[in-house]
Amino acid sequence: SKTVLGIVVHVNDNGVGGQIMTPWPIDTNGNKTSSNSTTMTWGGYGTDISSLPNYTSSSSASTDYDSCGNTDKIVAAGNASTYPAAWAARKYAPTADTAGKWCLPAAGIMTNIYNNQDAIQTAISKVGGVSYPSCCNWSSSEHSYNIAWTSHFDFSYSLDGGNHKTNVYSVRPVLEF
């Protein structure tokens, strides 16, 4: 009779707190969906957000765990039509207590998901979620003015920094605890 909020995908280094990920993708209105083919853009081409660091290598991007800090900066930079992925994450509200608290996962979180794929897929299955796709989910980590990082597990690596912000990919929000 309990509502499953998400799957633990990150525990902070000190063992206190972390982040959970929703076990299903969401649509642009923040509603959970049953299909990984529900997609949206990150934002417009050439929309560098100056307050977001630009991670130009996967090794540097994989150190970014600031999902909600990044999402705060993205939503402050524009509206839901300018930055659909971040705004969709913020609209997701499986409970009244978590409304407005969900975020786009940072690239480091996606690296954790890649490194723990089997356990995460098993947990998603146990709660009746939609399996995490091998490609592609948006992160809140920016690469450059026209590129944002995505998860990309097809080629034995966790991140892809070659995806234009106008491409359409899935969104799976995270919640800090």
Image (cartoon, helix red, strand yellow):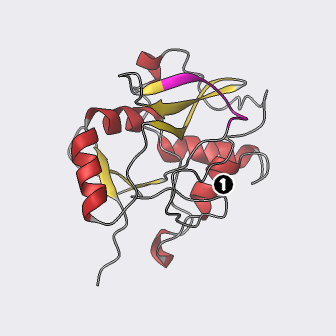
Residue 160, given in percent of the width and then of the height, sits at: 51, 24
Relative height, residue 146 to residue 114 (above, below): above
Q: As drawn, is 139 to the left or to the right of 65?
A: right
**Measuring 49% from the left and 51% from the top, which residue is drawn there?**
172
Whether residue 13 appears in magenta in the rendering, the answer is no
Residue 35, given in percent of the width and then of the height, sits at: 51, 57
Q: Amino acid at mark 1?
A: Trp
Residue 7, given in percent of the width and then of the height, sits at: 31, 56
Relative height, residue 13 to residue 37 (above, below): above
Q: As drawn, is 45 to the left or to the right of 105?
A: right
Q: Which residue is mark 1?
A: 87
Relative height, residue 1 to residue 128 (above, below): below
Q: Nearer the viewer, residue 58 or 171?
A: 171
Q: Nearer the viewer, residue 1 or 66?
A: 1
Q: Could you tell me which quadrant the N terminus lies in?
A: bottom left
- What stretch of residues is rendered in magenta? 160-167
For mark 1, give the secondary structure. Answer: helix
Q: Could you tell me which quadrant the C terminus lies in?
A: bottom left
